[in-house]
């Protein structure tokens, strides 16, 4: 069977017009979702969250390099010094300063940032910018879904669209039911060890991207990285 063009997918209701510019990797899962639940089936609802978690997390054929390439072409890129990073999801490559002493670390963090600060010598190296966030790669797929269903309630918008952001703070993260999962996945990143631009994931596609198997755990497996402290 010939592969449908984007226009044909839109005509058949497998894609909405505003989804047509999403990365091919993301569009592929969206069309499969609508093939399952019917043309124009709603997304970013409980049913779609669950379906994407179950379907995507089992797909081990996904290419990490392909994901970076497609996301870089389709999504906006930012630098750590840009304003407005808080409450948004970013993908980037990272090389920890003290990687020799870490039992496991992720070279491809996928993070919801909730704070940033400049080290003063007492907390953090003086003059260095630090970013704190939840790296969802440190959570099992089911825990990612549980976490997401909690933090999405702090959306500043009535829906998930391009300008949406989460009103996240550390106190907010400690206040809800998924606090244990959130704390396990909270990581601090030095801006001077981020090796690429920050690729900002459009909120319309958080429910898809967060389950992609694009983590790059070094010195350890998923099992080790997912183990709660």
Image (tube, rainbow, N blue to C red):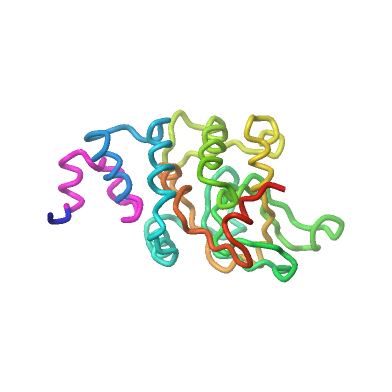
Query: What residue is at 62 percent from the left and 47 percent from the top?
Result: 134
User: In the displayed structure, does residue 121 sit left or right of residue 208?
Assistant: right
Depth order, front residue of 24/17: 24
Identify the residue at horizontal 51%, vertical 57% (top origin).
Answer: 91
Location of residue 123 (image quadrant): bottom right
Position in image of residue 133 (x %, y %) = 64, 49
Q: Residue furthest right?
A: 122
Answer yes or no: is residue 84 visible: no
Task: Assess whether residue 226 is covered by the magenta stretch.
Answer: no
Q: Is residue 216 above or below residue 158?
A: below
Q: At which x and y percent is residue 163?
A: 46, 41
Q: Extreme bottom residue here?
A: 100
Q: Is residue 194 visible?
A: yes
- Residue 204 image offset from top left, x and y in percent: 40, 42
Say which quadrant the N terminus sits in.
bottom left
Above or below: residue 211 compared with residue 91: above
Residue 16: percent from the left, percent from the top? Answer: 26, 40
Relative to 104, 58 lies left or right: left
Magenta residues, start to end: 4-26
Q: Residue at x 39, y 31 (%)?
A: 47
Choose between 113 and 25: the one closer to the eye: 25
Residue at left 77%, top 63%? Answer: 127
Left or right of 143? Residue 158 is left
Return the residue found at the far left: 1
Q: Total marks drawn?
A: 0
């Amino acid at each position: 069977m010939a592969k449908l063009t984007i226009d044909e997918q839109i005509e058949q209701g497998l894609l909405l017009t505003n989804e047509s510019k999403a990365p091919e990797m993301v569009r592929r899962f969206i069309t499969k979702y609508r093939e399952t639940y019917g043309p124009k089936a709603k997304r970013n609802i409980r049913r779609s969250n669950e379906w994407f978690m179950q379907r995507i997390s089992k797909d081990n054929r996904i290419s990490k390099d392909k994901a970076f390439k497609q996301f870089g072409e389709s999504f906006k890129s930012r630098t750590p010094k840009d304003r407005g990073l808080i409450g948004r999801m970013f993908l980037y490559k990272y090389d920890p300063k003290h990687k020799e002493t870490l039992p496991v670390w992720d070279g491809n963090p996928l993070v919801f940032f909730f704070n940033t600060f400049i080290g003063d010598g007492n907390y953090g190296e003086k003059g260095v910018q630090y970013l704190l966030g939840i790296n969802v790669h440190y959570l099992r797929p089911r825990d990612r879904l549980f976490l997401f269903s909690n933090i999405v309630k702090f959306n500043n918008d009535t829906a998930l669209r391009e300008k949406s952001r989460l009103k996240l703070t550390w106190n907010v993260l400690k206040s809800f039911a998924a606090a244990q999962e959130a704390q396990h996945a909270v990581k601090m990143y030095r801006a001077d060890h981020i090796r690429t631009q920050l690729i900002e994931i459009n909120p319309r596609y958080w429910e898809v991207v967060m389950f992609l198997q694009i983590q790059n755990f070094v010195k350890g497996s998923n099992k080790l990285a997912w183990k709660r402290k």
